[in-house]
């Protein structure tokens, strides 16, 4: 393997990610991917056995980026509120800065993978979600969120993942602004209110 080959592989993954996002996995051909990087139509097969293997590499790129960002946050030993904000910022960073193509492909195209590849992807997704779930349970225990932890995670992921559809780097909000406001949106300002039940009048 020459020194240039790993770079060409990375270039193929980036270009395939963009094409899979724009055209869909099924509509994208190996010829399309090769043309996007200035290769002959058969050259990608020096790096990947099939289009399916390229899709797996694209999905793994997005997941590994997300896992690395998560590990950087959890390694700081922060409290649940600060960890929550850090996880939001890292997730947005993966989607909007490093994974603009990879994450949409992960969300919408990973089911096109083989059963074996999907099992590998699911195991990594479970690792990622488990850390979020623990953080949200800690927030719930501290009275910092009111909703169920699992429901909170699903709603937060939905909101964060949708930013890929509307965020613009030259827009009014920075990624830090979005992270701060998202955290405030989901966190309670103080302990949850106690439930109020009608009281019976005192017996005379």
Image (spheres, rainbow, N blue to C red):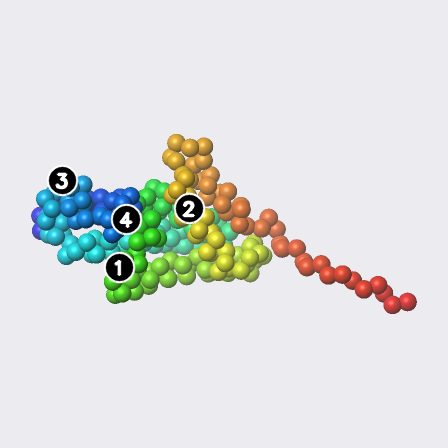
Q: Name the residue carrying label 3.
A: 38
Q: Tell me which residue sits at (27%, 45%) in the image.
A: 23
First in sequence: mark 2 or mark 1? 1
First in sequence: mark 4 or mark 2? 4
C-alpha span from label 2 to label 1: 23 Å
First in sequence: mark 4 or mark 1? 4
State the SS at label 1. loop
Q: Tell me which residue sits at (49%, 45%) in the image.
A: 182
Q: Name the residue carrying label 1.
A: 113
Is residue 65 at least partly visible in the picture?
Answer: no
Q: Name the residue carrying label 4.
A: 24
C-beta proximity under 8 Å, tags 3 and 1: no
Q: Tell me which residue sits at (27%, 54%) in the image.
A: 60
In which quadrant of the rendered image does the C terminus lie? Answer: bottom right
First in sequence: mark 3 or mark 1? 3
Q: Name the residue carrying label 2.
A: 162
173 lies above or below 47: above
Q: Position of residue 88 (x, y in %)?
A: 44, 48
State the SS at label 2. helix
C-alpha span from label 4 to label 2: 18 Å
| 146 horizontally vs 52: left or right | right
**In this view, the mark in front (4 or 2):** 4
Q: Where is residue 108 in the image (x, y as percent from the top left)?
A: 33, 52
């Amino acid at each position: 393997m020459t020194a240039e080959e790993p770079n060409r592989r990375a270039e193929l993954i980036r270009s395939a990610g963009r094409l899979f996002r724009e055209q869909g996995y099924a509509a994208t051909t190996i010829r399309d991917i090769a043309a996007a990087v200035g290769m002959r139509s058969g050259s990608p097969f020096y790096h990947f056995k099939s289009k399916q293997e390229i899709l797996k590499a694209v999905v793994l790129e997005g997941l590994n980026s997300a896992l690395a960002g998560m590990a950087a946050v959890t390694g700081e030993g922060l409290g649940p509120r600060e960890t929550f904000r850090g996880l939001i910022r890292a997730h947005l960073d993966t989607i909007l800065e490093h994974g603009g193509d990879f994450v949409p492909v992960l969300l919408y195209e990973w089911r096109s993978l083989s059963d074996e590849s999907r099992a590998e992807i699911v195991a990594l997704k479970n690792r990622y979600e488990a850390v979020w779930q623990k953080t949200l349970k800690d927030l719930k225990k501290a009275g910092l969120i009111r909703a169920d932890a699992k429901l909170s995670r699903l709603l937060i992921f939905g909101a964060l993942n949708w930013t890929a559809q509307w965020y613009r780097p030259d827009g009014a909000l920075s990624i830090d602004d979005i992270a701060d406001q998202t955290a405030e949106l989901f966190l309670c300002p103080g302990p949850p209110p106690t439930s109020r039940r009608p009281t019976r009048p005192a017996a005379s």
